[in-house]
Amino acid sequence: MAAFPEPTEELDDTRQVLLGYLDFFRTTVEEKVRGIRPSDQARSILPTGWTPLELVKHLTFMERRWLVWGFLGEQLQDPYGDDDPSGRWRVGSEETADTLLEALRAGGRRTREVVSRALLSDRARLGGRFTDAPPPALERILLHVLQEYARHVGHLDIVRELVQPDGGGIGE
């Protein structure tokens, strides 16, 4: 399991602290999903109906929506490609744990690239996700993405406990 980035580390660069937490949670998502039996990765056991693989795809698209479409203002062909027409998360039959987790890692690399070229105080560009001024600063976007990851890692913990009662907590 990836080491939790303790807040006592001697890092003066807030950008690196935020990126470190994002890397930690991305790695934790991958470890949690890989720790679920393949037969349980693509099935839902929750009333809301999402599967662990759908969650991975959602996180990939969520991060891209906030950093690429949101902060950079780049036009995306399908910013909500993780949703079906009813708004539920979806995974195509050709998508596997390996391809979805690689897309998650690639999204993380793109986030690092975006963040390394900006100041945390820089505001998102208008024209993508944001059309009204003032758009949020990069720091606020990163904090939002971070809380999304943290919340969904907790969801994966619950799923693992339900499908594998002997393991699944974040500290394992």
Image (cartoon, rainbow, N blue to C red):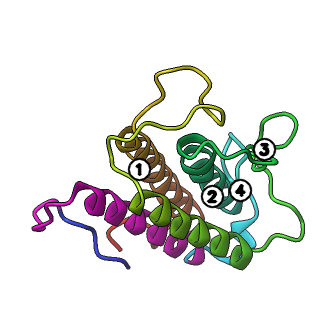
- Residue contact between numbered discs 2 and 4, judged by CB atoms under 8 Å: no
The CA distance from mark 4 to mark 1 is 18 Å
The quadrant in which residue 100 appears is bottom right
Q: Which residue is mark 1?
A: 146
Q: Mark 1 or 2 closer to N-term?
A: 2
The CA distance from mark 2 to mark 3 is 12 Å
The overriding secondary structure of the stretch rendered in magenta is helix
The CA distance from mark 2 to mark 4 is 10 Å
- In reply to whether residue 14 is colored magenta, the answer given is yes
Badge 4 crowding class, 10 Å Cα cut-off, few under 14, some 14 to 19, many 20 or more, is many
- Tag of residue 60: 2
The CA distance from mark 4 to mark 3 is 9 Å
Q: Which residue is mark 4?
A: 54
- Residue numbers of the magenta segment: 7-34
Residue type highlighted by circle 3: Asp
Tell me the quarter of the image containing the C terminus: bottom left
Give the residue displayed 39% in from the left and 63% down from the top.
116
- In reply to whether residue 17 is colored magenta, the answer given is yes
Q: Mark 4 or mark 3: which is in front?
A: 3
- Residue contact between numbered discs 2 and 3, judged by CB atoms under 8 Å: no
Residue type highlighted by circle 1: Leu
For the question of whether residue 169 can be seen, the reply is no
Q: Pinpoint residue 108: horizontal percent, then vertical percent.
A: 52, 66
Q: Mark 4 or 1 closer to N-term?
A: 4
Q: Which residue is mark 3?
A: 83
Residue type highlighted by circle 2: Thr
Tell me the quarter of the image containing the N terminus: bottom left
- Tag of residue 22: none
Instruction: Pick whichever, 165 or 40, lies toward us.
Output: 40
Badge 2 crowding class, 10 Å Cα cut-off, few under 14, some 14 to 19, many 20 or more, is many
